[in-house]
Structures are given as structure tokens and as C-alpha cells.
Amino acid sequence: MNHLKLFLVLGVCLFVGINNIVAEEENPKTVFDENILIDYDIIGSSVIGGYNVTITNKIDGAALIIGNSIVVNSNIEYALISGQDITINGKIKDALVAGNNVILNESSNVERDIIIYGNNVEISGLINRDVTIYGNSVKIDSVQIAGNIKINATNINITENSAILGTLSYNDDAVLTKAESAAIGNINTFKVQQKNTFADKLKEHAVNLIAMVVVFAVVLLAFPKLFNDIKLKDKNYLKTLGTGFVTILVVPIVSIILIFTKLGLPVGIISLILYVICLYLSFILLGFLLGKYFINKVLKFKCTPYLTGIVGITILYVLHAIPYIGGVITFVSIMYGVGIFINLYLKYRNEKKSA
């Protein structure tokens, strides 16, 4: 019944929030729909998400634009754009763009800097400062770049009528095709960082483990009762796993939806932060439980909670680091740990009600 009340409250929040977006604002700054056409000016920051998104009027502020197909034909001050197919024809002051196919046409104008992550990237037009591109296939076609350009890609094609006043830097293992008429100030190459050696990976795991143990010690010092309530015998372990799975699945979805509503924005942000903390601490909680089992049942001696946690977290982390199966172990561990977290919270709430 309590869970039903929770979902009813969330449903009301979503309904009210979405109605506020659609009904109260004639020209909303936050828009979510399947097909979106922004044909009115927006003064201030905006959040726009849909399957097909077209921007024809200016956005005088920061804009977060998410969609499958995105076309920008107007002026945007600051833009964060993510989608499958992205085409920019207008003017942007600064931009971070991530997509599968990213095109800056000849009419595009970047007043300062742009960073692009994409599979296929094609840029034309005018860029008044620096460009950074991470992609697979990159085409520089009749572009005018006043600053520097850095490219990390597999194939790079620079056509004629392209001008780069600064320095072109690209990874030395890329295939570069450059037209002789292309004007480039300087050309440098850089080495792609090599894969971590075994020693580097071992050092990284050691640092992560130590950090986790430190967090465990701080949490144990601040909330000793939290670990005292963790029991070795869990008759309903399948229910605990199920609770953890549902929580991991539902919370981020609901939180993201809430973030995109005016009424639920603070709740969505706070719930996402708590969600991440819960995921991290769930691994520690299960590690402590594992240490408790190993020391009491296998080694059969008593020790301090600190040593119990260190032993269990270390065992669980070693299992997590095993190739291939480590990912499965980690997911199940977090799922079960989140289930423990929820059960402890429900127990605490029931005790508080009965007190």
C-alpha cells in the first residue's frame, strides 16, 4: 500500500509538472514531444527533447537539446546537443555536440569553441576559435578555422578551400588525406595513449580498493548501527535481489523524468545523487556481509567490524576484478546490496512508526 501511495504521488507530480510546461507557458522553455519545432524566441536557458527536433528561432541562453534527428537553423548562445543525426546551420557561441552523424554546414558559424564527439563528422562554415573532434571519419570541407583544430580519428579528409590559421593536431595512426590547396598554418601529430600495462591496472585497482575501504571506515564511524543491523541469514534473498533490481531500474527513470518537469526538478536531482551514493554504498554493505560470513563461518573467530569490512570488501573487489564474470558479479552484488539498503530503510521506518 505504501508503494502504491509513492507511485501515485510521483504520478501527480509528473502530471502537474508536464501540464505546467504545456498549459501555463505559451512559449515554453522546457519541451518534450515526439516532433518539436521551436519557431519562437527563447530568452534564457532551455531543455528540449524529442524524436525530431528543429530549431528555427534564437535561444538567448544555454540550451540542452536531445533527440534522434536534430536540426539547428537559428542562433544559440551556448549549446549542449546529443542525438543520432545532428545538423547545424545557424550560429552558436560555444557548443558541445555528441552524435552518430554530425554536420556543420557552410552557413554554420561558431563564435568561439566547439567540441564534437561523433562517428561521422563533417564540418564547414566558420569557426572563430578552436575545434576539438573525437570521431571515426572526419571531413573538413571548405571550413574557415581562425584557431587550432585537434582531431582524434581513424580517417581524416581535408578538402580544398579549407583554411586553418592555427595548428592542425591529429593522432599519428590516423589516415590523413589533404588537398594541396588547403591552407594550414602548422601540422602536428600526437601519439594515442597506450593501453594500461598490468602494473598500471594493478595500481588502479589498489587505489580503488583503498578508497572503498576508507569510505567504509568513515561510514562505519558515523553510522555504526547501520552495519549492526545487517544479518547473515537472509531467508528472502530472492526478494532482496528483486527489490534491488526494481530500485536500480525504476529510480533513475523516474528521476530523469522529474528533472524535465518544473515541479520535480529539485526532487529529481536529489534522488539521482542519492541513487549514485546508494549504489556505491551497496557494494560496501555487501562486502561487510561477505566478510562477516567468511570470518564467522570459515575462519570461525571474532574480530572488529573494521577488520570484517576490510576482509569482505577486499574479497568482493577481487571477485569484481575477474575478467568476463566480474561484471556479472558486480551487478548482482550491487543489486543485492541495494536490496539490503531498502530493507534496512523500511525496517528503520517501521521501528520509528511503532516507537
Image (tube, rainbow, N blue to C red):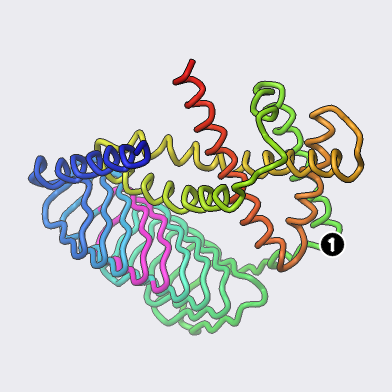
Residue sitting nearer the eye, 126 or 73: 73
User: Seen in the image, is 246 located left or right of residue 102?
Assistant: right
Residue range in magenta is 76-101
The residue positioned farthest toward the top in the image shown: 355
The quadrant in which the N terminus is found is: top left
User: Seen in the image, is 73 located left or right of residue 306?
Assistant: left
- Residue at 54% x, 50% y: name it: 239
Determine which quarter of the picture holds residue 211.
top right
- Residue at 31% x, 56% y: name it: 65
- The reply to whether the magenta stretch includes residue 178 is no
Residue sitting nearer the eye, 138 or 187: 138
Query: Where residue 219 appears, x then y in whole percent?
Result: 67, 28
- Residue at 47% x, 74% y: name it: 119
Kind of residue indicated by mark 1: Phe
Q: In the rendered image, which residue does mark 1 sit on?
A: 198
Query: Where residue 162 appears, x then y in whole percent?
Result: 42, 75
Q: Residues within 10 Å of mark 1 (few under 14, many from 20)?
A: few
Query: Where residue 77 appears, x then y in whole percent?
Result: 29, 48
Query: Where residue 246 appears, x then y in whole percent?
Result: 47, 52
Q: Is residue 118 above or below residue 110?
A: below
State the SS at label 1.
helix
Q: Is residue 82 above or below residue 308?
A: below
Q: Is residue 149 above or below residue 31?
A: below
User: Seen in the image, is 186 located left or right of residue 44?
Assistant: right
Q: Is residue 320 above or below residue 101?
A: above
Determine which quarter of the picture holds residue 12.
top left
